[in-house]
């Protein structure tokens, strides 16, 4: 999939850019990559380790780098209709885009993803990898 719809946003994969109502939102490349990883998980948690591996490419980075990147993304994308952060923290695990942010037309693929992950013993055991989307 090259285009993802969530909340009031459209995230294009090639070229990597975020739009709101057809208006481009300027984000750094790293923030866009973090957002892409989160959106591709469709509401499932993305582990801290996955960010390190796929965004920072196994470089030795501080947790604060990811925390700061997510904070800046939260300021950009705001909250859901119910007032929750669009990007949620899953304590001691990682982050996710609030499941309610995905449009009805994507519900079937979201449900299929949940079924595919249902064999996991815990959220920590479920590692999202962009290669599986």
Image: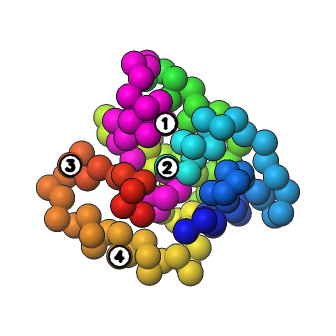
Residue beneath disc 3:
125
Decide if residue 34 is in sight here: yes
**First-in-chain label (1 vs 3):** 1
Q: Are marks 1 and 3 in contact (CB under 8 Å)?
A: no
From the image, tell me which residue sits under label 1: 55
In space, the residues marked 1 and 3 are separated at their CA atoms by 20 Å
Name the residue carrying label 4: 112
Q: Are marks 4 and 1 in contact (CB under 8 Å)?
A: no
Can you identify the residue that label 2 sits on?
37
Q: Earlier in the sequence, mark 4 or mark 1?
A: 1
Q: CA distance from mark 4 to mark 2?
A: 18 Å
Chain part drawn in magenta: 38-62
The residues bearing labels 2 and 3 have C-alpha atoms spaced at a distance of 17 Å
Front-most of 1 and 39? 1
x then y, percent, for residue 52:
41, 32
Residue 113 location, x and y as percent?
35, 69
Please name the colour scheme applied to the rendered image: rainbow
Q: Quadrant of the N terminus?
A: bottom right
Asked whether disc 1 touches disc 2, contact meaning CB atoms under 8 Å apart, the reply is yes
Residue 34 image offset from top left, x and y in percent: 54, 42
| Vertical arrangement, residue 52 with respect to residue 107, above or below | above
């Amino acid at each position: 999939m090259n285009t993802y719809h969530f909340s009031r946003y459209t995230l294009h994969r090639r070229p990597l850019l975020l739009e709101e109502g057809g208006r481009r939102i300027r984000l750094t490349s790293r923030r866009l990559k973090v957002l892409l990883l989160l959106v591709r998980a469709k509401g499932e948690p993305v582990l801290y380790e996955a960010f390190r591996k796929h965004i920072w490419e196994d470089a030795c980075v501080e947790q604060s780098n990811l925390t700061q990147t997510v904070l800046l993304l939260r300021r950009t994308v705001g909250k859901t209709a119910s007032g929750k952060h669009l990007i949620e923290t899953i304590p001691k695990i990682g982050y996710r885009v609030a499941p309610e942010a995905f449009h009805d037309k994507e519900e079937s693929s979201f449900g299929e993803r949940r079924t595919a992950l249902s064999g996991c013993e815990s959220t920590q055991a479920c590692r999202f990898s962009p290669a599986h989307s």
